[in-house]
Amino acid sequence: MKINEIFYSIQGEGKWTGLPNVFIRTTGCNLRCLYCDTKYAYEKGIEKTIEETISEAGKYNCKKICVTGGEPLIQKETLKLIDKLIKKNYKISLETNGSIDITPLTNKAKLIISLDIKCPSSKMHEKMIFENIKKLKQKDQLKLIIKNKNDYEYAKEIINKYKPACTTFFQPVWGTNSKLLADWIIKDGLNVKLGLQIHKIIWGNKRRI
Ligand code: SF4
């Protein structure tokens, strides 16, 4: 499979925020979000076997691994990679962009599915598979990336309609006003978590390696 980077850092998003994680970033994405912060993962990477990938991730003293992209599910080997990591007793979160059916992941009790749903400012919102939201379980997480009030109202409609069983994060696009988003959430009394990308607060919006 083609791997863009493997590195060790602090998880900046979702329910593992603040915890050290190993990150396995796969190469390639089927979307082109306007605000994408990982364009470097569209093409660049090195072909590695699943065994080489696991061995490299295993160099760090850490049992939590985030498989991210790009979009990890466009490579068929990703499912095998996850299965092998679970067998080796790693705790895994898999970040996926909402445009690919997550059904093959839903029988993996030890996997946290971290599902993005893209809002209109991404210009990719029409590519979302909303049935994915209904497949999420309590252990999983849903993330809506919000740039403006229009995105916020859209995100509200989505959670009201699909009623996710898991924790939902409303996360501002990096560089937009998180205070505004916080105020909207408070005013509406939404049962969502404001998700800030703490790795960017700590290190800025640049690659860690
Ligand atoms: S899904 Fe993620 S990696 Fe792909 S274009 Fe959107 S932000 Fe970038």
Image (tube, rainbow, N blue to C red):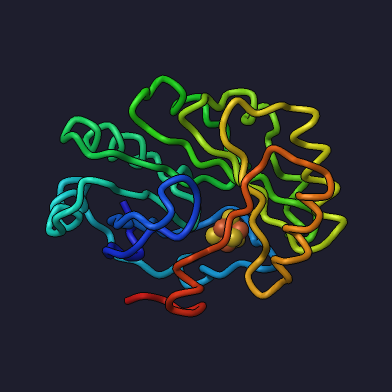
| Position in image of residue 57 (x %, y %) | 20, 55
Of 59 and 166, which appears nearest the observer?
Answer: 166
The quarter of the picture showing ligand 1? bottom right
Q: Residue at x 27, y 31 (%)?
A: 83
Q: Residue at x 55, y 27 (%)?
A: 136
| Position in image of residue 48 (x %, y %) | 23, 56
Instruction: Work out which quarter of the rendered image holds the C terminus and state it.
Output: bottom left
| Quarter of the view holding residue 160 | top right
Furthest-top residue in this view? 107
Of 174 and 58, which appears nearest the observer?
Answer: 174
Q: Total marks drawn?
A: 0
Residue 141 in the figure: left or right of residue 52: right
| Position in image of residue 152 (x %, y %) | 80, 52
Q: Residue at x 58, y 23 (%)?
A: 135
Q: Residue at x 45, y 56 (%)?
A: 69
Position above or below: 172 against 209: above
| Position in image of residue 10 (x %, y %) | 35, 62
Position above or below: 13 against 73: below
